[in-house]
Amino acid sequence: MYNFSKLLASSTDSDFEEKLARLRREHSMTEYLLHNQDIAGRVRDVVLDVGKRGDKAVCEYTERFDNISFEPSEFRVSEEAMHVSHEHLPEDLLSSMRRSIENVRDYQSRIFVGGCSQEGAVKYTPLKRVGLCIPGASAPLPSTVIMTAVPAMAAGVDQITVISPPRFEGSIHPVILGLCWELGISEVYRIGGAQAVAALAWGTETIPKVDKIAGPGNDYVQLAKKEVFGLVDMDSFAGPSDVLIMADENANPSWIAADMLSQAEHNPGAGIVVTNSESFAKEIISEVESQCSRLSRSRETAECLKKYSAVVAVEDEEAVIDFANSFAAEHLEVQFGRRSREIAEKIKNAGAIFIGPYSPVAAGDYFAGPSHTLPTRQSSKYFSPLSSNDFVKSSSIIDFSENMLREGADDIIRLAEIEGLDAHAKSVAIRLGKAD
């Protein structure tokens, strides 16, 4: 049995504020970037090298980092291999994936604003070509394919490219390939890491350039996405996963413990609880100790819990809400019984909000409809979940008649002249016969 008593941070502790400040700091984007400058420098070198040398550099880095030797002609997975993988998918798994796809497609279509171009105001256009990062060297993550590709499809993206790191023998997991075939994605490259992101951003001899890169990955992938931003668009910065669970003493401590452990299982991943009852906080810790000892990967999960997780006991409900808004979680569970919806309305910062005891994070990870690609490390203060609306761009529409221009001419000319831009002013005046 593990001892997780040190996870408790109580408002009665003399160093409570110091503990909270440290907890917020350790999970912040600022802390992450400041402590990964050495990696960022190496990533920058890789990105620039791929930009200069293209496929040759991608081959060299794939051999160095993944111990796989490829020729550029071998990057792309054949359609035949994808078709065969699809044929061998278990029927029950394929059915589950299809139901998930249907839910995500329905949700992403309902929230899509790109079809609402307003005459004389704004025009929305789907991005032409998008690259998706799909982790999977150690275990297949088909849910990430669904949660990134289906929103892009709902937006009307024409061409979707998938990159996924090769396994030790050089292949991509057949579940990933079979799912891509199911979705109609035929362009899949068995490369990963910073070199793959750079290849998508610059374009190489064999890999066409994309307009946007989305999807999770390790530190090298995320820092590479940050490095190429501007060459292409990107989604939010995806760091280690986290869940913050807001709960009162009437919630089920065993369910909360299970949700904490489900995040720690990512390793790294943070499961944090904030409650207004210290006795309930101790019940949760006891449950975590009991459940963790029965996990197949209990040692790794326990290490992750001790490093990244906490159970915070504050004085009242208002303090629970304040902590949640300051922490800005990726996943936020609200377990306050019948008042859960009311409490959730007071949340300003969260990637996804899971209301009530029957809305575990896993429901959002796999099935509910919103993408599970969410802002991490407190970036939900300024980033949003990935959605169909991230795969369109807008163009402003200015469509003046002569009368409209005439009505605004004096103001336009005056503003241009105060900025010393006489040619701007004249471009209006000449149309209305006012030019000297």
Image (spheres, rainbow, N blue to C red):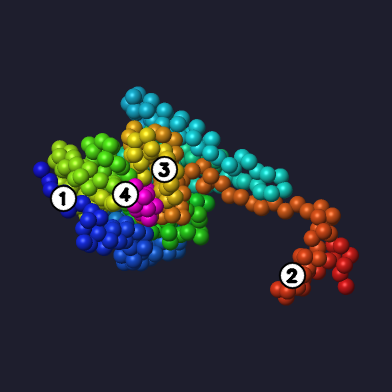
User: What is the quadrant of the N terminus in the image?
Assistant: top left
Compared across the picture, whether 115 is left or right of 352 comes to right
Is residue 179 a member of the stretch shown in magenta? no
The label nearer to you, 4 versus 3, is 4
Closer to the chain start, of discs 1 and 2, is 1
Residue corresponding to mark 1: 5
Q: Which residues are magenta?
A: 316-331
Type of the residue with mark 3? Ala
- SS at mark 3? helix
Type of the residue with mark 4? Asp
Closer to the chain start, of discs 4 and 3, is 4
Tell me the quarter of the picture where residue 333 sits.
top left
Q: From the image, give the main secondary structure of the stretch colored magenta.
A: helix
Give x and y (percent) for residue 380. Answer: 42, 52
The label nearer to you, 4 versus 2, is 4
Residue corresponding to mark 3: 344
User: What is the quadrant of the C terminus in the image?
Assistant: bottom right
Residue furthest to the top in view is: 91
Residue corresponding to mark 4: 316
Front residue (pair 191, 98)? 98
Give x and y (percent) for residue 122. Answer: 66, 48
- Label 3 and label 1: CA atoms lie apart by 29 Å
